[in-house]
Amino acid sequence: MLGTNDVKVEYHATPSQIASGLGQMIRELYQHYKLLQLDPPKLIVVCPPPLEETAGINSEGMFDLQSVAASHELAELYRQTAQTYSCCFLDAGKVTRFDMQEGIHLNINGHLLLAKAIAGIISGMNWLERLE
Protein backbone atom coordinates (compact mmCIF):
# COMPACT_ATOMS: atom_id res chain seq x y z
CA MET A 1 0.00 0.00 0.00
CA LEU A 2 1.86 3.00 -1.32
CA GLY A 3 0.86 6.60 -1.79
CA THR A 4 0.12 8.28 1.51
CA ASN A 5 3.65 9.56 2.05
CA ASP A 6 3.84 10.64 -1.59
CA VAL A 7 1.18 13.32 -1.06
CA LYS A 8 3.23 15.03 1.66
CA VAL A 9 3.68 18.77 1.21
CA GLU A 10 7.46 18.44 0.88
CA TYR A 11 7.25 16.35 -2.32
CA HIS A 12 4.92 18.59 -4.35
CA ALA A 13 3.83 15.49 -6.31
CA THR A 14 0.64 15.42 -8.32
CA PRO A 15 -1.61 12.35 -8.26
CA SER A 16 -0.57 11.63 -11.86
CA GLN A 17 3.11 11.74 -10.92
CA ILE A 18 2.48 9.41 -7.99
CA ALA A 19 0.63 6.91 -10.20
CA SER A 20 3.37 7.19 -12.80
CA GLY A 21 5.92 6.31 -10.11
CA LEU A 22 3.87 3.25 -9.22
CA GLY A 23 3.86 2.22 -12.87
CA GLN A 24 7.62 2.67 -13.03
CA MET A 25 8.12 0.40 -10.00
CA ILE A 26 5.94 -2.30 -11.57
CA ARG A 27 7.79 -2.04 -14.90
CA GLU A 28 11.16 -2.33 -13.16
CA LEU A 29 10.00 -5.37 -11.21
CA TYR A 30 8.70 -7.04 -14.37
CA GLN A 31 11.95 -6.24 -16.23
CA HIS A 32 13.96 -7.79 -13.41
CA TYR A 33 11.99 -11.03 -13.65
CA LYS A 34 12.27 -11.00 -17.44
CA LEU A 35 16.06 -10.73 -17.21
CA LEU A 36 16.04 -13.72 -14.87
CA GLN A 37 13.74 -15.55 -17.31
CA LEU A 38 11.17 -16.01 -14.57
CA ASP A 39 7.46 -15.35 -14.50
CA PRO A 40 6.76 -12.19 -12.53
CA PRO A 41 4.77 -12.50 -9.31
CA LYS A 42 1.11 -11.68 -9.23
CA LEU A 43 0.83 -8.19 -7.77
CA ILE A 44 -1.92 -6.59 -5.77
CA VAL A 45 -1.88 -2.82 -6.06
CA VAL A 46 -3.44 -1.43 -2.89
CA CYS A 47 -4.39 2.23 -2.90
CA PRO A 48 -4.44 3.68 0.60
CA PRO A 49 -7.61 5.23 1.94
CA PRO A 50 -7.84 8.94 1.21
CA LEU A 51 -6.60 11.24 3.92
CA GLU A 52 -9.02 12.83 6.31
CA GLU A 53 -8.81 16.59 6.70
CA THR A 54 -7.30 15.96 10.14
CA ALA A 55 -4.34 14.12 8.59
CA GLY A 56 -1.36 15.70 10.19
CA ILE A 57 -2.39 19.14 8.98
CA ASN A 58 -2.20 20.51 12.49
CA SER A 59 0.80 18.42 13.53
CA GLU A 60 4.17 18.91 11.91
CA GLY A 61 2.57 20.25 8.72
CA MET A 62 3.33 17.07 6.75
CA PHE A 63 0.06 17.32 4.84
CA ASP A 64 -2.15 20.18 3.75
CA LEU A 65 -5.57 20.44 2.11
CA GLN A 66 -3.93 19.92 -1.29
CA SER A 67 -2.48 16.65 0.05
CA VAL A 68 -5.95 15.59 1.16
CA ALA A 69 -7.40 16.42 -2.27
CA ALA A 70 -4.59 14.56 -4.04
CA SER A 71 -5.15 11.48 -1.90
CA HIS A 72 -8.76 11.38 -3.07
CA GLU A 73 -7.62 11.14 -6.70
CA LEU A 74 -5.22 8.23 -6.28
CA ALA A 75 -7.68 5.31 -6.34
CA GLU A 76 -8.84 5.82 -9.92
CA LEU A 77 -5.29 6.43 -11.16
CA TYR A 78 -4.00 3.37 -9.32
CA ARG A 79 -6.86 1.28 -10.73
CA GLN A 80 -5.86 2.35 -14.24
CA THR A 81 -2.19 1.59 -13.53
CA ALA A 82 -3.05 -1.84 -12.12
CA GLN A 83 -5.15 -2.58 -15.19
CA THR A 84 -2.34 -1.50 -17.52
CA TYR A 85 0.04 -3.99 -15.90
CA SER A 86 -2.50 -6.79 -15.32
CA CYS A 87 -2.30 -6.45 -11.54
CA CYS A 88 -5.06 -7.03 -9.05
CA PHE A 89 -6.35 -3.84 -7.48
CA LEU A 90 -7.81 -2.97 -4.10
CA ASP A 91 -9.06 0.45 -3.11
CA ALA A 92 -8.48 0.32 0.65
CA GLY A 93 -10.71 3.37 0.97
CA LYS A 94 -13.67 1.14 0.08
CA VAL A 95 -12.76 -1.22 2.91
CA THR A 96 -11.52 1.00 5.72
CA ARG A 97 -10.40 4.51 6.57
CA PHE A 98 -7.55 6.06 8.48
CA ASP A 99 -7.89 6.54 12.21
CA MET A 100 -10.07 9.60 12.72
CA GLN A 101 -7.98 11.04 15.55
CA GLU A 102 -4.58 10.61 13.98
CA GLY A 103 -5.59 10.71 10.32
CA ILE A 104 -2.72 8.96 8.54
CA HIS A 105 -2.55 5.39 9.87
CA LEU A 106 -4.99 2.54 10.21
CA ASN A 107 -6.21 1.54 13.64
CA ILE A 108 -6.42 -2.11 14.72
CA ASN A 109 -9.86 -2.59 13.19
CA GLY A 110 -8.70 -0.94 9.97
CA HIS A 111 -5.80 -3.38 9.69
CA LEU A 112 -8.15 -6.29 10.27
CA LEU A 113 -10.55 -5.13 7.55
CA LEU A 114 -7.70 -4.54 5.11
CA ALA A 115 -6.17 -7.95 5.86
CA LYS A 116 -9.50 -9.67 5.22
CA ALA A 117 -9.92 -7.85 1.91
CA ILE A 118 -6.42 -8.78 0.76
CA ALA A 119 -6.91 -12.38 1.90
CA GLY A 120 -10.06 -12.50 -0.20
CA ILE A 121 -8.15 -11.38 -3.28
CA ILE A 122 -5.34 -13.86 -2.65
CA SER A 123 -7.73 -16.76 -2.10
CA GLY A 124 -9.36 -15.97 -5.42
CA MET A 125 -6.11 -16.09 -7.39
CA ASN A 126 -5.37 -19.18 -9.44
CA TRP A 127 -2.14 -20.30 -7.77
CA LEU A 128 -2.04 -23.68 -9.52
CA GLU A 129 -1.21 -22.09 -12.85
CA ARG A 130 1.98 -20.74 -11.25
CA LEU A 131 3.10 -24.25 -10.30
CA GLU A 132 2.70 -25.86 -13.72
Image (cartoon, rainbow, N blue to C red):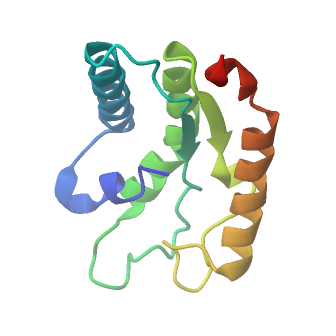
Instruction: Identify the residue at image location x=80%, y=41%.
Output: 123
Quadrant holding the C terminus = top right
Position in image of residue 50 (x %, y %):
56, 55
Q: Quick one: 14 or 104, which is closer to the camera?
A: 104
Position in image of residue 114 (x %, y %):
70, 60
Q: Is residue 122 left or right of residue 65?
A: right
Q: Quick one: 30 or 117, which is closer to the camera?
A: 30
Q: Is residue 117 above or below residue 77?
A: below
Instruction: Identify the residue at image location x=75%, y=51%.
Output: 119
Q: Is residue 64 above or below residue 86?
A: below
Q: Is residue 113 left or right of residue 3?
A: right
Q: Quick one: 99 or 125, which is closer to the camera?
A: 125
Instruction: Identify the residue at image location x=72%, y=41%.
Output: 122
Quadrant in the picture for residue 91? top right
Position in image of residue 76 (x %, y %):
58, 31
Position in image of residue 37 (x %, y %):
34, 13
Q: Is residue 126 above or below residue 37?
A: below
